[in-house]
């Protein structure tokens, strides 16, 4: 309830007003904003599950004793992180300096002046995967530096597949359902649930609902940004999840799953197939809290008639409009997002890099046999709506999908309502 009320306040607030850029000697100019001011800074993001972030901070702090960076950890889910960052900007607080922003927030944060433009020449954007770079700009200007990408993958239990005599991972939803039946009929697979993704009502549901809609040839918004979700294709896609809950190939408890709940189920050996991001790979293959080490592999997401398409995920680094130490923040962002650090992030946390050539690195490919699958997932990924009122758009998608998944609305009614809501949200918007 509390979160709903806050979301309503934030959604109703359009412009926060421009920050006064004051103090310090001029350092870097980007667009109209001066990037100046040096001193301690904070890095604001979700949980540091791998310890990678603290490692980078330690390195930076050693080299920059007067500009030390401190980690502020926000709640685990994307929606709460977004709310905290918007709230911070609304109160014009200087508590946050560097924001780790979800790729879908750039337009909203830029238009509302939560973040400032960055000097493009300071970043090696031409060496990065193109879909990632597209998430960093608003009205042609760079607002955030790519830090890690994300593409949805199908994790599957190789041991259970083998025991059931299945050699290849499923490419279609029907194959996935059939494989589960075969596996559940074996002694090893008895009682193991078939499939889960992220179905709690939050950003992860926007991702999962969009993926199944895309996987059946539908779209949420078309290439020009126009909503077009009230279609038979979109209905067929959403029905894969709706029927999953009805017919039991998705366990009932998965309606409460965000990334971490699903990861615990997969690592606990309770799922045959799991739609998840790359970060799960190292953790599920680790030495602690996992029963599936060495017993799983990763494939492209399945779809209706063949491989599906992922929603494009990932995170960028941006400077808060209200930071007092923007020059330090910019140097820190360059340091943090360097190719070397992204390589370490892949090695330590199996996070997807944004630098294209790391995907061709032989030793990385050996450690992560799915690296090419991951790059394809990112390059073929479908962006979520790129709109200034992203908070409203994602809430509409979450509400519709959740109503269909829980049986509160029929799939067609949910999509019809979503279409008209998205139409009113996107009418008259710049991208
Ligand atoms: C991951 C993705 C992000 C997405 C979120 C949804 O963190 O990188 O883009 O919004 O999951 O839960």
Image: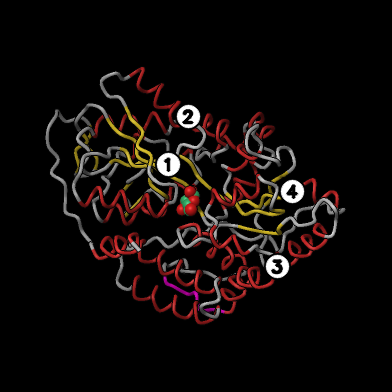
Q: Is there any visible trace of residue 85 in the rendered image?
A: yes
The numbered mark, 2 or 3, whose residue comes first in the sequence reads: 3
Disc 1, SS = strand
Q: Residue at x 16, y 54 (%)?
A: 17
The kind of secondary structure element at disc 4 is strand
Q: Residues within 10 Å of mark 2 (few under 14, many from 20)?
A: some
SS class of the residue under badge 3? loop
Q: How many marks?
A: 4
Alpha-carbon neighbours of circle 1 within 10 Å: few (<14), some, or many (≥20)?
Answer: many
Q: Position of residue 277 (x, y in %)?
A: 57, 48
- Label 4 to label 3, Cα distance in Å? 22 Å
Quarter occupied by residue 257? bottom right
Compared with residue 360, is residue 153 higher up or lower down, i.e. above or below?
below
Q: Which residue is mark 4?
A: 157
- The residue located at (54%, 65%) in the rendering is 209
Percent of width and height locating residue 167: 83, 51
Disc 1 target residue: 146
**Residue 24, percent from left and from top:** 14, 29
């Amino acid at each position: 309830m509390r979160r709903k009320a806050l979301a309503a306040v934030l959604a109703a607030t359009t412009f926060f007003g421009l920050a006064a850029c004051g103090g310090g000697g001029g350092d870097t100019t980007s667009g109209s904003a001066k990037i100046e001011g040096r001193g301690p800074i904070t890095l604001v993001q979700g949980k540091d599950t791998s310890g990678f972030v603290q490692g980078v901070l330690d390195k930076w702090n050693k080299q920059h004793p007067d500009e030390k960076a401190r980690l502020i950890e926000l709640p685990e889910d994307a929606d709460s992180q977004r709310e905290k960052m918007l709230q911070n900007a609304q109160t014009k607080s200087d508590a946050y300096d560097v924001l780790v922003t979800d790729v879908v927030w750039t337009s909203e944060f830029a238009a509302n002046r939560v973040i400032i433009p960055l000097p493009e020449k300071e970043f090696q954007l031409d060496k990065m995967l193109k879909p990632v770079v597209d998430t960093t700009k608003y009205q042609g200007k760079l607002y955030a530096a790519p830090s890690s990408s994300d593409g949805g993958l199908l994790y599957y239990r190789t041991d259970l597949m083998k025991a059931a005599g299945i050699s290849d991972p499923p490419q279609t939803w029907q194959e996935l359902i059939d494989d589960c039946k075969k596996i559940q009929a074996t002694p090893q697979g008895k009682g193991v649930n078939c499939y889960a993704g992220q179905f709690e009502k939050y950003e992860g549901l926007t991702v999962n609902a969009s993926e199944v809609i895309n996987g059946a040839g539908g779209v949420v918004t078309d290439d020009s940004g126009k909503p077009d979700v009230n279609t038979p294709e979109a209905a067929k896609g959403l029905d894969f999840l709706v029927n999953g809950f009805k017919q039991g190939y998705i366990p009932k408890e998965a309606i409460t799953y965000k990334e971490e709940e699903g990861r615990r189920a997969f690592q606990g050996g309770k799922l045959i197939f799991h739609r998840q991001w790359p970060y799960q790979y190292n953790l599920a293959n680790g030495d602690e809290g996992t029963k599936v080490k060495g017993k799983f592999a990763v494939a492209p997401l399945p779809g209706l008639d063949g491989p599906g398409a992922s929603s494009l995920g990932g995170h960028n680094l941006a400077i808060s409009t209200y930071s007092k130490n923007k020059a330090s923040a910019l140097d820190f962002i360059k340091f943090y997002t360097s190719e070397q650090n992204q390589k370490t992030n892949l090695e330590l946390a199996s996070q997807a890099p944004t630098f294209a050539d790391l995907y061709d690195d032989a030793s990385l490919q050996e450690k992560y046999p799915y690296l090419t699958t991951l790059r394809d997932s990112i390059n073929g990924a479908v962006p979520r709506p790129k709109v200034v009122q992203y908070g409203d758009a994602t809430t509409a998608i979450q509400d519709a999908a959740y109503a269909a998944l829980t049986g509160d609305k029929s799939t067609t009614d949910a999509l019809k309502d979503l279409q008209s809501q998205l139409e009113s949200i996107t009418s008259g918007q710049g991208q």
